[in-house]
Image: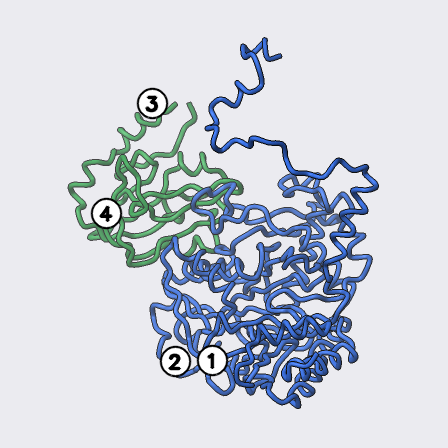
Chain colours: A blue, B green
């Protein structure tokens, strides 16, 4: 072959690569292994990992572990769902289209709004899309957000809105309760505000209790009200549509989707059924219709003229694929749980958090939670003992076999040495008691 | 060639919009030829009242767009044949966009514009005879 291509040896092929960056000796690798030996070797390496399933784990902060019934996975892994592509061709995609339509219907019911799209990438991109939608609907360029919103979501929001040059303006919080400062909101609301965004539950776990008032003020200024949610909380809490939200967004991962390095995630996006809103809705929308004789239901993508494959650079969004498989998993999960099942999950999450807070409050050197407000399934824990950092505290917890919360002192330095802890229905009383015991030792520096 | 409805007394753009002078204002719509090429209109995106608009030129820009008309699988921008300020939009199209198909020169009008350079700009448009010849050339 060398002769065919006109070189005399292999070295000549690499003549263009400077000698100083060339490897002069062979790779320092152990001798080859058989497949069986290689498997044993990899297994021994992997055994150094400590999976969160093997110790109580209290990380949340945007992705939450929940129990996923076995049939969710087995249904979602059917090849009809797993391998299907964007259902452009309705005549060969009725199953996928119906599954997505069911997902949309379930999400709409859950958030109390009329229309839901068939998903965005995650909560963060859904917030970005919501801000852009508010700007298109109102023709205004400023978007108000709470100062305590998730920093990751804020970063994505700024990224999404930098092109169309939207201005993201933060609203401060009450130092005691964490609640949005209403005077500041009132002062900033005006004819230039496209939308107001809140997170409920907040990134730090407490509930925003002034939602009705925020909705009225926002509407009064002609802006749109956007609410971000953890959908599990809606098993227990009033849906955003009931207190005046125009748009609801959220993270659909806790609905039947696992936590693998923080994903895969599922962006929830819904709005009121008003033509000026629906026409500006981002993302894919599946509709249901009946045949001319009225006997058969059919499903198809609808209002596609909003989308990229038709409207090109003037589309409402650059999202073309979506999180279809995660949406189907969410639909199966919600259908399995039903309203009473979801309520049970939400109640367990909230009562676990309440129990954990009550117990941790008794540990000297900790302040739990930092804000005096009701909480859902997450809460803050602050190390108030001098010279005890939250990272050190977490390291000590790990040594004691407990995975602590998400540190937020880097994102919100003004909150001090603080972490956000999450409880779900996966936590037992024993898990929480172990956390409390470990926390008491970690504060003292005991092993 | 197909027969298209072309009205005397209107001014026509090369993008198939028409202009009718009514006192100090002008009424704007799309022609019978345009509505037939678009097919069934399902949604009319209208300009905001008060929008400043420029007359369509060789190089099209956003400032020349009055809105868009959507058929089932296509969206077409509507360009303004006259510069000025949008004074009124045809609200009937919100509920019944098909009026653009059934009555392009009457009930299917798009908007009223307060022109700012009417005489100069009318000269750049075609009359009924010229537009008819133009359609013949398009084939």
Question: At 33% from the left edge and 36% from the top edge, which residue is drawn?
Answer: B15
Place of residue A394 in the rendered image (x, y in percent of width and height, measured from the top left): 62, 73
Q: Is residue B10 left or right of residue A108?
A: left
Tags 4 and 2 touching, CB below 8 Å:
no
Alpha carbon separation for disc pair 4 and 2 = 42 Å
Position of residue A364 relative to residue A1, above or below, is below
Q: Report the residue marked by disc 2.
A: A184
Mark whose residue sits in front, 3 or 2? 2
Q: Report the residue marked by disc 4.
A: B83
Residue B137's label in the rendered image is 3
Position of residue B78 relative to residue A288, above or below, is above
Q: Earlier in the sequence, mark 3 or mark 4?
A: 4
Return the residue nearer the eye: A216 or B12.
Answer: A216
Image-quadrant location for residue A120: bottom right
Question: At 41% from the left edge and 66% from the top edge, which residue is drawn?
Answer: A143
In the structure shown, which secondary structural element does the residue marked by tag 1 occupy?
A: loop
Q: Report the residue marked by disc 1.
A: A180
Labels 4, 1: one chain: no
In the structure shown, which secondary structural element does the residue marked by tag 3 occupy?
A: helix
In the structure shown, which secondary structural element does the residue marked by tag 4 occupy?
A: loop
Tags 1 and 2 touching, CB below 8 Å:
yes
Return the residue nearer the eye: A369 or A316.
Answer: A369
Mark whose residue sits in front, 4 or 1? 1
Labels 1, 2: one chain: yes
């Amino acid at each position: 072959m060398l002769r065919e291509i006109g070189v005399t040896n292999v070295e000549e092929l690499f003549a263009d690569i400077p000698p100083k960056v060339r490897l002069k000796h062979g790779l320092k690798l152990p001798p080859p292994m058989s497949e069986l030996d290689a498997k044993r070797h990899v297994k021994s390496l992997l055994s150094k990992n400590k999976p969160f399933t093997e110790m109580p784990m209290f990380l949340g902060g945007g992705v939450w572990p929940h129990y996923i019934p076995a049939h969710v996975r087995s249904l979602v892994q059917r090849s009809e769902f797993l391998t299907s592509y964007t259902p452009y061709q309705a005549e060969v995609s009725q199953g996928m289209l119906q599954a997505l339509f069911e997902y949309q219907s379930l999400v709409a019911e859950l958030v109390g709004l009329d229309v839901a799209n068939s998903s965005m990438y995650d909560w963060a991109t859904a917030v970005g899309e919501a801000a852009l939608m508010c700007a298109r609907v109102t023709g205004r360029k400023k978007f108000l957000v709470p100062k305590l919103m998730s920093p990751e979501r804020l970063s994505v929001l700024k990224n999404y809105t930098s092109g169309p040059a939207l201005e993201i303006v933060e609203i401060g919080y009450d130092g005691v309760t964490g609640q949005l400062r209403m005077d500041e909101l009132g002062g900033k609301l005006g004819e230039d505000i496209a939308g107001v965004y809140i997170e409920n539950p907040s990134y730090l776990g407490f509930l925003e209790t002034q939602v009705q008032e925020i909705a009225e003020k926002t509407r009064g200024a002609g802006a749109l009200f956007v609410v971000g949610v953890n959908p599990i909380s809606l098993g227990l809490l009033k849906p955003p549509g009931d207190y005046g939200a125009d748009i609801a967004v959220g993270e659909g991962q806790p609905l039947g989707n696992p936590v693998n390095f923080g994903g895969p995630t599922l962006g929830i996006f819904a709005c009121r059924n008003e033509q000026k809103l629906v026409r500006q809705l981002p993302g894919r929308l599946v509709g249901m219709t009946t045949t001319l004789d009225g006997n058969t239901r059919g499903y198809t993508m609808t209002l596609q003229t909003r989308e990229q494959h038709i409207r090109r650079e003037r589309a409402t969004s650059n999202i073309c694929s979506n999180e279809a498989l995660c949406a189907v998993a969410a639909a199966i999960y919600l259908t399995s749980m039903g309203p009473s099942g979801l309520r049970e999950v939400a109640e367990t999450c909230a009562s676990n958090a309440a129990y954990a807070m009550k117990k941790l409050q008794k540990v000297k050197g900790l302040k739990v939670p930092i804000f005096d407000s009701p909480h859902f399934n997450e809460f803050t824990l602050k190390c108030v003992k001098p010279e005890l950092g939250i990272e050190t505290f977490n390291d000590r917890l790990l040594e004691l076999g407990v995975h602590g919360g998400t540190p937020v002192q880097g994102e919100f330095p003004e909150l001090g040495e603080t972490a956000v802890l999450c409880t779900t229905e996966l936590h037992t009383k024993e898990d929480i008691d172990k956390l409390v015991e470990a926390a008491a030792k970690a504060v003292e520096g005991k092993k | 060639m197909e027969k298209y409805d072309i009205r005397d007394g209107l001014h026509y753009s090369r993008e198939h919009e028409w202009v009718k002078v009514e006192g100090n204002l002008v009424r704007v719509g799309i022609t019978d030829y345009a509505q037939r090429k678009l097919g069934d209109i399902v949604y009319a995106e209208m300009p905001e009242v008060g929008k400043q608009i420029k007359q369509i030129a060789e190089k099209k820009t956003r400032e020349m767009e009055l809105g868009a008309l959507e058929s089932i699988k296509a969206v077409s921008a509507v360009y303004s044949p006259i510069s000025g300020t949008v004074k009124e939009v045809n609200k009937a199209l919100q509920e019944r966009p098909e009026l653009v198909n059934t009555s392009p020169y009457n009930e299917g009008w798009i908007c009223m514009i307060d022109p700012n350079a009417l005489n100069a700009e009318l000269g750049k448009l075609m009359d009924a005879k010229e537009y008819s010849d133009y359609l013949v050339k398009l084939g």
